[in-house]
Image (cartoon, rainbow, N blue to C red):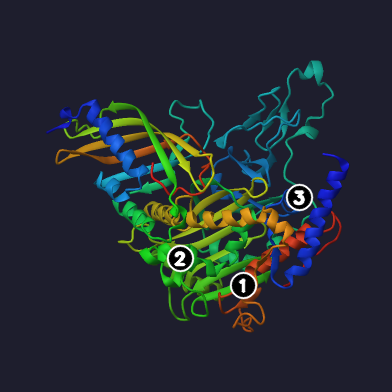
Amino acid sequence: MSADAGTAERSRVDVLLEQMGADLDRGLVPAEVFNDPSVYERELRQVFGRCWVYIGHESELPDPGDYHVRMIGEDPFVFVRDEAGVIRVLLNSCRHRGSVICRVDSGNTSHFRCPYHAWTYKNDGSLIGVPARQNGYRALDMEEWGLIPAAQVDSFHGLVFATLDPHAPSLHDYLGKFRWYLEMQVALTKGGMEVLGEPHRWLIDADWKSGAENFTGDSSHTQMTHRSLLEVGIADQAGAGKTGKAHGLHVNECDGHAISMRVLAEGEERWFDYPKELRVQFEQGALNEAQLDLVRRGVVHDGTVFPNMSFIHFSAREDIELPARPFLSIRTWQPRGPGHMEVWSWVLAPREASPEFKESVYRAAMASFSPSGAFEQDDAIVWNGVARTGGSLAAELQGIRFNYQMGMPGMGDAEPLADWPGPGTAWPSNSGESGLRTFHRRWFEQMTAPAPGAASPVEDKE
Amino acid sequence: MDMSAIDDSALADFYHREAEYLDDNELHNWLALLAPDVQYRVPVRAVRERGVTATDSDFTDRANFLWENIGTLRTRIRRLDSEFAWAERPPTRTRRLVTNIRRREPASGETGSETGALTNIAVYCYRGSSPTPVVLTGQRTDTLRLVDGELRLANRLVHLDSTVLGLHALSIFL
């Protein structure tokens, strides 16, 4: 590529972002952000190179030496529990000449040995062996040449995150006030949640942002995209029916993250259809009364931790002759090139649940949110279309903007709640796209943030 | 009539008929080929370290793309009957090649009424106007049972060769 072409490409993304800054206030987002090489290149650096991203759950590494290969942006990292029990996130690359040291998805090992020249590392990343050291590497400082760890690694109730930016705020501050909502998903019981089995992984010809924005609270797509489930009775009206003030709650402007909740009326109980023996434990867990109330009335909670980690706490029928079963699904929308993503999806259940109950959780989740899931099958189809339009010449030449105005002032019939007990801005209706606007505002601010290290507090405002 | 009356040709006929029903989207006819107590599973493959023990496998019984019985398969097919099941509107065009049919002793030991069978499958999937198919390949480990003189699928385990599904939705059966 010539220098001129490089300059032209950089200016293209800058022009697009400049336009987007003005459009966002009107609830509009340029179509091209969903499929454009220059946008993609920028977001790998600005978003995935600098934000905290979800790596995995502590329960996936029960024993020392257990490891899985996980992604930050498009870069592979080894998610491993070392011999001392410390969880590490290490670049899957030999320090000698860059060959991949871990060529499988999962395993258990005390050491990683590079197949190229046999540089050997302990599972905490420290270098302990190089070939012909006495003849060729007598002065090599072994301490200096360990595997490269992510700049920061931390966890929240078993959820392990990492960032490549040493200047990023702490995970505590990054999750911010949204921790209040995450606790309702992963801290229901004293033991917390446990991942069941290996993740589902599949490719979709859609941008990672389509999944991420949808889970912030795209409540109005369910009655069309997922209409077949309502027809057959896999899900009910409270869980996936029409939007409005009956069941819907949206919370946005929560430190860049957002959640949608469908809950029953005050005084009614649903508990995501968890059975009584577990409900009792929820009441003895870490949740305060306001959080517990949202779980007690909870039909579905779904949200996104910026940038690409989403969750859904829900229940569904895998067999319409049988009752609905609860489940928690956590997923990451991994970027795999402009207009392409790989979805990774995990099923979780309370650690205290019986093996039989965990099996029912797994089956309910697989039957609804997985590549074969009754919900998720149809999401992939509609998201493909977004990327296709985003990558079209028409999107550029005709300046196509997508509409995120649902529920905005002058559009919606709901006002933010003044007496909401939790953080963020809460709306007593899910006939809106406030969470999606929060997502795109946060994305825009990250894309236009000053260089790493410069002080740049990101304010989440709509 | 017992299993000794089912020769290799009759076994192949069963698999060809099954593939025809699935390729032609005659899912209710396919359901009729299943035993009422059918167990149908497509586990997730994750590439693991090998060589620690001879039984190391990429598969566990904890993670599955499909983990079905007759009730859940009926529910899936009833949903696919809906005109709003977008993943199959329009339907995926599939062509199933079923080969390398091998008879095995049935796991139950009931050789009179059941037989085991291994088959290789290649399923070519075309969606939209793409000229390039997504191809799923794998090995199926089946138990077939004679019910009133007809072969019925009583158990199926599909070991896919891929770890990451290239298909954006697994809305077909294997």
The count of marks equals 3
User: A272 or B87, which lies in front?
Assistant: B87
Label 1 amino acid?
A: Val
Respond whether the residues carrying marks 3 and 2 are from the same subunit.
yes
Residue A101, given in percent of the width and then of the height, sits at 66, 31
Q: Secondary structure at mark 1?
A: strand
Q: Secondary structure at mark 3?
A: helix
Quadrant containing the C terminus of chain B is top left
Q: Mark 2 or mark 1: which comes first in sequence? A: 1
Label 2 amino acid?
A: Gln
Q: Which residue is mark 3?
A: A38
Residue A368, given in percent of the width and then of the height, sits at 44, 57
User: B174 or A181, which lies in front?
Assistant: B174
Q: Is residue A135 left or right of residue B105?
A: right
Residue A73, disc: none
User: A273 or A83, which lies in front?
Assistant: A273
Kindly report the distance in space between the C-alpha atoms of the residues bearing marks 2 and 1.
26 Å
Q: Is residue A120 left or right of residue B11?
A: right
Q: Which residue is mark 1?
A: A251
Please tell me how crowded label 3 is: few (under 14), some (14-19), or many (20+) other residues with Cα within 10 Å: many
Residue A62's image quarter? top right
Disc 2 is attached to a residue of which chain?
A: A
Kindly report the distance in space between the C-alpha atoms of the residues bearing marks 3 and 1.
32 Å
Most extreme residue toward the top is: A135
Residue at screen point 36% across, 63% down: A232
Q: Which residue is mark 2?
A: A281
For marks 3 and 1, give the one nearer the viewer: 3
Quadrant containing the N terminus of chain B is top left
Residue at screen point 66% across, 56% down: A390
Kindly report the distance in space between the C-alpha atoms of the residues bearing marks 3 and 2.
50 Å
